[in-house]
Amino acid sequence: MHKSLGAKIVEFAGFEMPVQYEGIIAEHLAVRNSVGVFDVSHMGEFFVKGKDALAFVQKVTTNDASKLVKGKVQYSAACYEDGGIVDDLLVYCFGDYFLLVVNGANVQKDFEWFSKNKTGFDVSLEDKSDDYSLLAVQGKNSITALQKLTGTNLSEMKYYTFTEGRVAGIDAIISRTGYTGEKIGFEIYVSSDKTISEKLWNSVFDAGKEFNIKPIGLGARDTLRLEAGYCLYGNDIDNTTNTIEAGLEWITKPDKGDFNGRSRIVSELENGVKRKLAGFIVDGRLVARHGYEIYANGAQSGHVTSGSFSPCMNKNIGLGYVQKQYSEPGTKIDIKIRNDFVNAEIVKIPFVGKN
Amino acid sequence: MNIPEDLKYTKEHEWIKVNGNVGTVGITDYAQGELGDIIYVDVTTIGNEVKQGDTFGTIEAVKTVSDMYAPVSGKIKEFNSSVNDNPAIVNQDPYGAGWLAKMEISNMGDLDNLLPASEYKKLVGA
């Protein structure tokens, strides 16, 4: 299907994934200016059910799932006992059970880790990743396009809520979420049955035709999330970083009670972190890419974790870890790009405001 | 994929068009397609003598960065500065308006080490 649209394909998380169709910049701008569709079926879906479902979710994630009510979605993180991040994820509350949506590359690792943590909890944990296809329809015109396909009143759905409904006559979980920084965007979970998922794909493209809807590849998914300042697991966060360093304090709730990684997190909060993930804008036209060294005051301070050209800003932007004293907006840093030390400045994230 | 017959090619996907002792150099249609959207071309070797196979600049695309290798030995005479006003022309017209550098060829024999269009076609599976 993707190949027939002229996509460049890579293998990712065991899926054949499109890197780009028309080109990263054109796809990026389509999402920012109108609407684009991502096939993100590689994401993992785990269901947590049983008497202790909430207690279990509280144990394995950093955010406070007790705040959730049916129909609410929460961004969260899962940690190891040492505070290192296992994954970042979405927690969907269905009332007495939960859906955890995890990164495609981490499905197996996460499932094994969560399974280990079941001891003492009266829960069932099911990996339903193979049963779901997921389309993200993002951008300001997504709502008008999708509204043609569903009886659910999409304009009544708030950001980070979901509902079960039908889209193009297909049973779906309709979620007002996304990984683009677009305020208006939906993620639609349907059966992975090929006939059904292709019907949804085709229906969405028909509905979005008047808005010049475009298929979007992994390349633009990355530039969009970077402009929004969102972390990418494996780049900006991993098992060597914790949520406090990564600027994810807002999803870290030590007051909720015990959870994996809590003692490390409390210690980071009490003693202060040594390094912080910060956004930067590069002076000039060289791109600071993942792994490049960051210098401050003449010495190495950290490294770039994500870096790219920003199609909206027409500048080169990135995220990286720096020593905490250099993490404030306005701080001048240098990034070693091949043989050059290139000036850059720490800035507030998100780079591109929610529109 | 466009692979003009009148050019010579490197295995690293540069092309050269020879006119007297001046060579016009660029990257191939295949290369621009693999790189995706090109956002900047950095040639810092203008006026320098380079050897065949030396790096004479880098190309920044959104997703990746790639070195450019001199197809022959010689002096880098000129850089196509219009490329950096509109880097997309390298994607749109890699053999024409998107040329990258002009070289003074010091050893015409270097051209024998390059691939003719027919061989380059095989290399990229076209």
Image: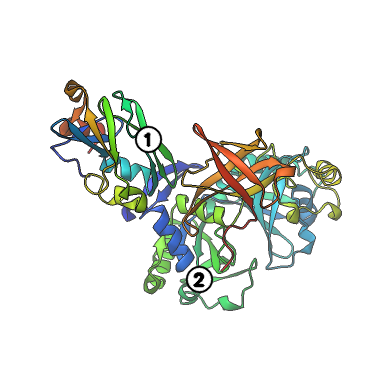
Q: Amino acid at mark 1?
A: Gly
Q: Amino acid at mark 2?
A: Lys
Residue B100 percent across, percent down from the top left: 29, 41
Q: Position of residue B32 (x, y in %)?
A: 32, 44
Give residue A193's position: percent from left, percent from top.
46, 56
Give the alpha-carbon distance from disc 1 to disc 2, as whole Å: 40 Å
Secondary element at image label 2: loop
Within the image, what quadrant is residue B94 found in? top left
Work out whether residue A50 can be spotted. no
Q: Which residue is mark 1?
A: B57
* Location of residue A211 (image quadrant): bottom left
Residue A274, horizontal then vertical, whole percent: 76, 39
Q: Residue at x 29, y 44 (%)?
A: B80
Residue A152 to residue B86: above or below = below
Q: Please name the residue that numbered disc 2 is placed on.
A: A140
Q: Nearer the viewer, residue A6 or A353?
A: A353
**Other residues around mark 2 within 10 Å, as few (<14) / some (14–19) / many (≥20):** many
